[in-house]
Image (cartoon, rainbow, N blue to C red):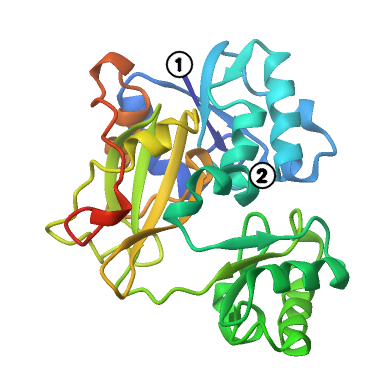
């Protein structure tokens, strides 16, 4: 097994500082580590050179910064040419990383959503009307601009088409060439408390912790890590994270699903815990959990 992490841009023989703790944990556990040039991967201009330092063959897990789906596919292809197979295929990465890949299978567990392919206003208008009036949250296939909440993320009322498009236009300005896929509209739901991030490997929940944005807001004492197993396992994705939040009416809701390779680890989860889960014999992992029942999805049953 091999762990692949980004190299430090200024010191290419060392791991990026952000992933150094996981690198140390992997090496201490006897897992080989290889470095890649993330900037070259993200540009897509010289992918073979970006992976040229990798000399170990076999199955690998990437832990690093986000890559566009097409860049990840080129990364996977370049690794295959060196005898390395990513545990998460390019198709699986795209399904986890981009909202339209996972939303249809989890639609009942997450806010209602519509989206466009591309960023034309005419397509946005169709998506806006399809979702109906009321408040919504705007994003693209992979990312929101939540730190620009009132100017580029939150739409108070979808009935006001011009105001909604003004928010979308600001979002497009801020994201610029980084926009992925199209414009996504999510029905706004009011949540109480911080998000919880759960880590899933091969359909089993292996870690439960805080969201990286609020790392010290640990899950409530009665948080049950078991439900959702059947729903996540049905996706057939090898390594994902699921962010949940407690809605104001006491129902736990999925806020986001993401590919685990590019999901940030909060500082309150030890790197040894994540690395240990990633490289544990599958037979030693916990069994797939029971399905979530929406009718009983209350505080004690997220």
Disc 2: CA contacts within 10 A as few (<14), some (14-19) or many (>=20): some
Residue in the foreground of this view, choosing between 132 and 4 = 132
Residue at the far left in the pictured view: 221
Query: Is disc 1 in contact with disc 2, using a CB cutoff of under 8 Å?
Result: no
Instruction: State the image coordinates of residue 134 (x, y, percent, origin top left).
Output: 57, 82
The residue that disc 2 covers is 67
Observer able to see residue 17? no
Task: Identify the residue position indicated by label 1 in the image.
Answer: 1
Check disc 2 and report its element: helix, strand or loop: loop
Considering only vertical position in the picture, is 90 above or below 65? above
Residue drawn at the location 23% of the way across and 55% of the way down:
296
Sequence order check: which comes first, mark 1 or mark 2? 1
* Residue 61 screen position, x and y as percent: 50, 27
Say which element carries label 1.
Answer: loop
Q: Residue at x 26, y 33 (%)?
A: 289
- Number of marks present in the image shown: 2
Viewer-proximal residue among 13 and 212: 212
Quadrant where the image shows the N terminus = top left
Image quarter for residue 226?
A: top left
Front residue of this view, candidates 191 and 56: 191
Observer-side mark, 1 or 2, equals 2
Q: Is residue 30 left or right of residue 182?
A: left
205 to the left or right of 85: left
Q: Position of residue 228 (x, y in %)?
A: 33, 42
Q: Which mark is residue 65?
A: none
Q: Quadrant of residue 179?
A: bottom right
**Image height of 274 relative to 144, above or below:** above
């Amino acid at each position: 097994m091999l762990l692949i992490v980004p190299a430090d841009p200024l010191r290419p023989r060392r791991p990026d500082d952000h992933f150094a703790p996981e690198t140390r944990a992997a090496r201490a556990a006897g897992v080989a580590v290889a470095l890649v040039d993330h900037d070259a991967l993200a540009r897509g201009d010289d992918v073979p050179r970006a992976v040229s330092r990798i000399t170990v063959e076999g199955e690998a897990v990437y832990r690093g910064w986000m890559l566009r789906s097409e860049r990840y596919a080129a990364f996977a292809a370049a690794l295959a040419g060196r005898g390395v197979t990513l545990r998460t295929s390019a198709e699986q990465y795209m399904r986890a990383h981009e909202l339209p890949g996972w939303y249809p299978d989890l639609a009942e567990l997450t806010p209602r959503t519509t989206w466009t392919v591309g960023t034309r206003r005419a397509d946005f208008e169709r998506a806006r009307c399809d979702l109906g009036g009321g408040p919504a949250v705007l994003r693209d296939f992979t990312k929101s601009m939540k730190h620009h909440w009132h100017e580029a993320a939150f739409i108070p009322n979808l009935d006001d088409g011009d105001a909604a498009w003004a928010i979308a236009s600001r979002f497009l300005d801020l994201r610029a060439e980084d926009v992925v896929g199209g414009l996504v509209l999510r029905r706004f739901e009011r949540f109480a408390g911080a998000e919880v991030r759960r880590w899933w490997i091969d359909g089993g929940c292996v870690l439960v912790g805080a969201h990286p944005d609020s790392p010290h807001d640990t899950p409530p004492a009665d948080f049950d890590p078991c439900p959702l197993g059947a729903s996540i396992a049905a996706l057939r994705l090898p390594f994902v994270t699921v962010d949940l939040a407690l809605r104001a009416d006491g129902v736990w809701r999925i806020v986001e699903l993401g590919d685990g390779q590019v999901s940030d680890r909060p500082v309150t989860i030890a790197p040894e815990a994540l690395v240990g889960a990633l490289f544990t014999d599958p037979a030693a992992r916990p069994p797939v959990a029971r399905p979530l029942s929406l009718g009983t999805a209350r505080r004690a049953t997220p």
